[in-house]
């Protein structure tokens, strides 16, 4: 998946790179721009963006399918529930965020603040929901020793046992 994205993005950057274009919205009485909007644009966006969306969409659906298949594995041994929630969160943010980006881009031609805010919120919510759903239960377990209502008596112990003679310590007899 990563290599497909890297290849597609590299080819896009080589064949049809994004170019900065600035549009003047208003001028002062002397003909100088007083308000302008700049964006990165490309003439051939969809031949590259379409496959990227398709590949990542298929990966998202496959992740949901695998989470569904592993739903009966005990949570102590599997993070399926949390991964499924993270993937569903990404799907939900995408489903709501992309139309919002389109709306703010079309309506606010002279004010890019709304579009920028929506983009930042999409990235923030997607990243934080994934990180919190994956790591928060682990931190909770480490702090309390309680895993979903079941008290786990064994605390963390080193996985490597070292004998006293191996480190040069005298052995008591």
Image (cartoon, rainbow, N blue to C red):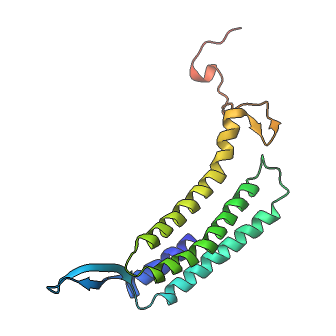
Q: Is residue 132 above or below residue 5?
A: above
Q: Residue furthest top?
A: 173
Image coordinates for residue 21, horizontal then vertical, percent: 31, 84
Q: Position of residue 59 (x, y in %)?
A: 66, 73
Residue closest to the far left = 30
- Quadrant of image for the N terminus: bottom right
Apparent side of residue 61 relative to residue 71 in the rendered image (left or right): left
- Callout count: 0
Q: Residue at x 52, y 60 (%)?
A: 124
Q: Closer to the camera, 151 or 121? A: 121
Q: Residue at the location (44% across, 83% down)?
A: 11
Q: In this rendered view, identify the residue nearer to me: 67 or 7.
A: 67
Residue ID at (58%, 22%): 167
Residue 112 is left or right of residue 26, and the answer is right
- 161 to 99, vertically: above or below: above
Where is residue 54 shown, x and y percent of the image?
61, 81
Residue 166's quadrant in the figure? top right
Q: Quadrant of the C terminus?
A: top right
Q: From this viewpoint, which residue is outermost toward the right? A: 72
Question: 160 or 167: which is nearer to us?
Answer: 160
The answer to whether residue 18 shows anywhere in this view is: no
Quarter of the view holding residue 42: bottom left
| Position of residue 82 measured from the top left corner of the image (x, y, whole percent) | 71, 55
In the visual, does 138 lie left or right of 116?
A: right
Answer with the quarter of the image where residue 97 lies.
bottom right
Question: Compared with residue 166, is residue 117 higher up or lower down, i.e. above or below?
Answer: below
């Amino acid at each position: 998946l990563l290599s497909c994205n890297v290849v597609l993005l590299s080819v896009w950057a080589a064949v049809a790179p994004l170019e900065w274009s600035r549009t003047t919205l208003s001028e002062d009485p002397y003909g100088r721009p007083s308000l302008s909007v700049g964006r990165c644009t490309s003439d051939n966006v969809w031949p590259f963006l379409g496959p990227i969306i398709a590949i990542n969409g298929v990966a998202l659906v496959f992740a949901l399918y695998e989470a569904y298949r592993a739903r009966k594995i005990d949570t102590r041994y599997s993070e399926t529930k949390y991964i499924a929630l993270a993937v569903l969160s990404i799907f939900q943010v995408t489903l709501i965020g992309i139309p919002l980006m389109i709306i703010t881009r079309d309506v606010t031609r002279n004010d890019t603040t709304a579009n920028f805010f929506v983009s930042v919120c999409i990235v923030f919510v997607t990243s934080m929901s994934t990180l919190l759903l994956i790591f928060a239960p682990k931190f909770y377990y480490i702090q309390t020793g309680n895993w979903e209502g079941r008290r786990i008596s064994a605390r963390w112990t080193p996985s490597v046992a070292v004998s006293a003679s191996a480190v040069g310590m005298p052995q008591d007899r």
